Image: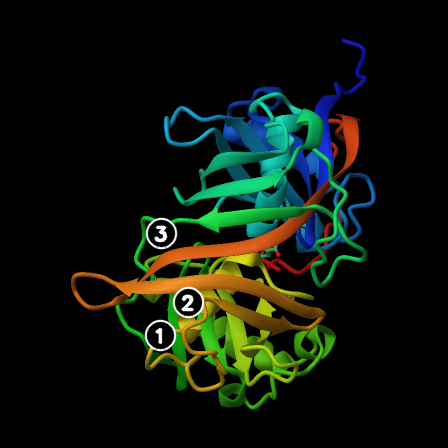
Amino acid sequence: MSGVPEGVPCLLMRGGTSKGAYFLAGDLPAEPALRDDLLLRIMGSPDERQIDGLGGAHPLTSKVAVVSPSADPDTDVDYLFLQVAVDRAAVSDRQNCGNILAGVGPFAVERGLVAAGPERTSVRIRMVNSGDRATATFPTPGGRVDPTGSAEISGVPGAAAPVLIEFPPGPRPLLPTGSVREEIEGVEVTCVDNGMPTVLIAAASLQVTGYESPAALEGDRGLAGRLRAIRLEAGRRMGLGDVTDTTVPKLTLLAPPREGGAVTTRTFIPVRCHPSIGVLGAAGVAAGLRMEGSVGAGPARLEPGVDRMRIEHPTGFLDIETSLGSTPEGLPSVRRTAVVRTARKIFDGTVFPRSAGTAPTHPHPLGEQR
Ligand code: NQM
């Protein structure tokens, strides 16, 4: 053996407001422990700067999609999302990612898993992490993925081709605790799961306005402690067990809109404050706002009879469509969710992982999931 590390075929893509490494499942080890070790070495973790890998030193740019043909006749491809921690040697499959999802359809066409239509292509995707499904539709003029277009999304400079993502109802209850509103640590919350377990909290009930910058909120140690305590208990009540080391549930602070939208948000993922908002996180907010009696119903300004709503976040807004129905027990359920994102292939090539057995000896001392 020469000791020269083997390269792995990889497509680096921006998906929505996130960026990640996309792989065909067949190009990675099938054994999860070996796969995760390889991904840590590819992304450059654990290291606050991820200087020796593809990762961008933030949870939103330390993401991986693993894609394969689907065995399910109702979907074309399986998409496994993996969150690679930045400053810890940890890879988690406990959450989905709706932003990285935006790149999965174009990736499937690029890699020949799905044949492109002459004008546009729809790819039916099974999200392996949660069992949820999505259909992504995007332009493929002349049978090729064309990322150019006029769709703009807040948090991404310029414009690109729209990727319409439609979600049918998922297999899990929208209200994992069975309640529209409950009290945790003396604070009223609504625990919701429209593809991403999320705890909704009125910003005012935590003595913040909800209009602070992410940096200001991240720097508020008192707030961080209260959010952590709420999250641990909410995770338990939502059936997620001990969530100390997991990235779900997320927490979203809500305040009345300031830019003509339906609500203002600040989302913790779960320690860092998101510079915008996750897609499935936004889907949870949108569903939560529509539920009578939820903590979102107070700050929300909704247009009656209109499925689309504008969710404001620190760098702009995200437009999302949702409609709700109800379960036979009379609890709210989701009929449909749809959102437009953009995605772009940045680099297609071979990535060379750091050699095995060369983990940094001085990772960031913070031992908690960020
Ligand atoms: O909620 C961040 C992101 C996400 C996830 C996170 C996402 C989603 O912005 O669907 O997109 O919540 O960790 O990529």
Q: Give how far across and how far down residue 119 sits, in percent.
A: 63, 33
Quadrant housing residue 7: top right
Question: Which quadrant holds the N terminus?
Answer: top right
Say what amino acid the circle numbered 3 marks. Answer: Pro
Q: Secondary structure at mark 1?
A: loop
Q: Are marks 1 and 2 in contact (CB under 8 Å)?
A: yes
Residue 273 in view here: no
Mark linked to residue 118 = none
Q: Residue at x 71, y 23 (%)?
A: 9
Do tag 3 and tag 1 residues touch (Cβ < 8 Å)?
Answer: no
Distance Cα–Cα, label 3 vs label 1: 16 Å
Residue picked out by circle 2: 287
* Label 3 sits on residue: 169
Name the quadrant where ligand 1 sits. bottom right
Q: Earlier in the sequence, mark 3 or mark 2?
A: 3
Disc 1 designates what residue?
Answer: 291
Nearest the viewer among 213 and 364 is 213
